[in-house]
Amino acid sequence: MSEAEGREIVLGRVQQALRTGPRLPAPLRIDLPPQPGEQSRAALIEEFKQEWEALQGKFLRMPREDAVVRLSALLRELGVRRLLAWNEEHLPMRDLGVGLERAGFRLEGAVLPRRDPARRERIRQLADLEVGLTGAAAAIAQVGALVLPGGPGRARLASLLPPIHIALLTPQQFYATFEAYLTAQTQTGASAPMLASSSSLTLVAGPSRTADIERVLTLGVHGPGDVLVVLLE
Amino acid sequence: MSGSDSTFQTRIRAALGDANLQRALDGNFTRARESLAEAMDTLPHANATRDRARAIRIEALAHLDQYLLQLEEQVTAHGGVVHWAADADQATRIVLRIAQDVGASVVVKSKSMVTEEIGLNAVLQRMGLRVVETDLGEYILQLRNDHPSHIVAPAIHLTRDDVARVFAEKLRPPAGVSLDPGELDIPTLTALARAALRAEFIHAGVGVSGVNFGVAETGTLCLVSNEGNGRLVTTAPQVHVAVMGIERVVPTMADLEVMLRLLARSATGQKITSYTSLLTGPRRGDEPDGPEQLHLVLVDNGRSNVLASELAEALLCIRCGACLNVCPVYREIGGHAYGSVYPGPIGAIITPALGGISEYGELAQASSLCGACQDVCPVRINIPELLLRTRALHREAAGGEKRWNALFGGWAWSMASPVRFLWGARLARLGQGFARRFRKRLVLPAPLAGWTEYREFPGIASRTFRERWAARAVTSTDD
């Protein structure tokens, strides 16, 4: 059977089923009230912090002016020198990248070649980088999740390959629920297609985890085991 | 009724006799119910949300052709390729061809029930491809040539020593790491698996995943994961193949957001999984990474038949597994006893619906119809009702059963007349008195003996109501 035939058959069967049946329950109209949530910024940040830490994520706040110095100290403490980073324009602080590089750290973007074996080899190199540095589009307080869009300058691999992931956020980015975040986008004119404006958008709620061996919770299976949110104020 | 044990019954007995499995199932039952209840407590308007989720799924199925066409259009507009597979055979051939077209020798997979349903791994392996399951539990089992014993944690029957031994045997240790099984603790074992699987993710030519929801509005494929292997499978290899049952559509992004409030809570008691990926097409021209090709394989394999049948409501299922976790039968027999890709309450309906009523309809017997499943289903599927329909279809397909027909025929005959009922009751009373002389517990004679093997037959009163009424009317002096 050719693929075109497969398509004809499947569509035909579905349409036939819908014509003669379907034996589905009657359609309903259910209007869901919006979820309530904290309104004050401070309360949202606090709620997010609690959820995030309950997921074994770490949370730090620092004034912008101190960011380069304190992040440098943090990275030195972790014994780390190389970072897989989003481009500067997607980090909430300009000149952060420059500042870190002046402090002796190396930041790499992750633009992959299009074809193997060069593509594969580049990923292998990137897998050696110890820290991933990203911004975020939003932080969702109710569940403790970061919204990480993809697109130019925002590599998926930055929050996935390295064992440590640092996400930089600002206080304006906190929302009560994912629903609230989506509603806000719609109101500013960027509707649902915004979510589809890059090939990838990922919600990250803490470190990678499994309990597959003896049901013992283990972090950092395939994704980062250490996830740190840094709130720049 | 009892005859010789079917293979289902044999597997049930085996499961009941497996002490390790029983312990694991008991633990799972308690934990899962508590965490599900707690998680739903944290969801505002939880009941209304479930109603809305049900409405979304009904809408999706009621216009399935429309939404599938929209999904196809959108995925294609974003650079993806959509394939339609009428059955398992066509689906596996499509995936195979994609892999062969890019010259892949290794395929990495994240856990996907539909790919198990279509038997994908066996087909790829037969054609010389190496298939690597990347969920930690599945990976361990693959190394051992073992099978999942449990739907929740497939490697639940293994101890850390079992895992250490197979890692020592099958994995090449990174520099400086000893693989002495005695020295390996769980974090070290996990780190070893992480390193080994990293190499596989990077080496693989094709990544195969399932799809939790396909969003028609934007052509977005939603995939959830806790370990992160779902993300790596769909990002590292050059080619991503997403396999999706045709019923897994939702109309809009707003609908998806509602479903996501319920999926993790119902499945694992988490408010949200560690990772939720929304994938719209392959890597775009100006993006730094992502797969160069994205293929969506839409699989029918009997779903359109189900849509036309009286079991259509079963297609609402979002594969969360909540019904398994609260089912008192599943608690006793586990998933493996069902002998099918889809176990538990919903599995007892979908497996016969997709795979054949005659062959699998017996699974629908494994239920007390208590309704715990329906109570927790995030889309409120009326599972007990569907189980009854499945049983009826199974009976019909088997041509009815002579003993059942005779029994109920006789029952109907004796109930149709007051005189027959009265004499039937008197005879039964006589028989009961006689039987009681020989044994304490009432059992029925063969061929009905199976009915009383695990149940008591209700005792027959010494007088029928009409006899008591007649006696009362004679002796009473009141009105």
Image (cartoon, coloured by chain):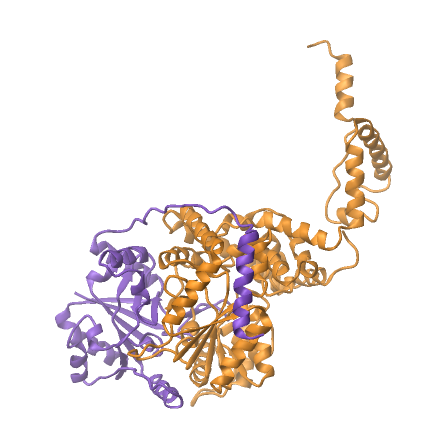
Chain colours: A purple, B orange
Residue B184, image x, y percentages: 49, 79
Q: Is residue B386 among what the camera can see?
A: yes
Query: Quadrant of the rendered structure where residue A2 is?
Result: bottom right
Q: Is residue B157 among what the camera can see?
A: no
Q: Residue at x 53, y 56 (%)?
A: B315
Position of the C terminus of chain B by quadrant: top right
Closest to the observer, B302 or B230: B302
Please tell me how many numbered marks the rendered image carries: 0
Left/right of residue B398 with respect to residue A3 in the rendered view: right
Residue B100, image x, y percentages: 51, 84
Left/right of residue B105 with respect to residue A116 in the rendered view: right
Q: Residue at x 30, y 83 (%)?
A: A111
Left/right of residue A28 with respect to residue B19 in the rendered view: left
Closest to the observer, B198 or B29: B198
Residue B89, image x, y percentages: 60, 73
Residue B247, image x, y percentages: 50, 60
Left/right of residue A193 with respect to residue B55 in the rendered view: left
Q: Is residue B467 above or below residue A72?
A: above
Closest to the observer, A152 or B168: A152
Query: Quadrant of the rendered structure where residue B461 is?
Result: top right
Query: Quadrant of the rendered structure where residue B405 is?
Result: top right
Q: Residue at x 41, y 82 (%)?
A: B238
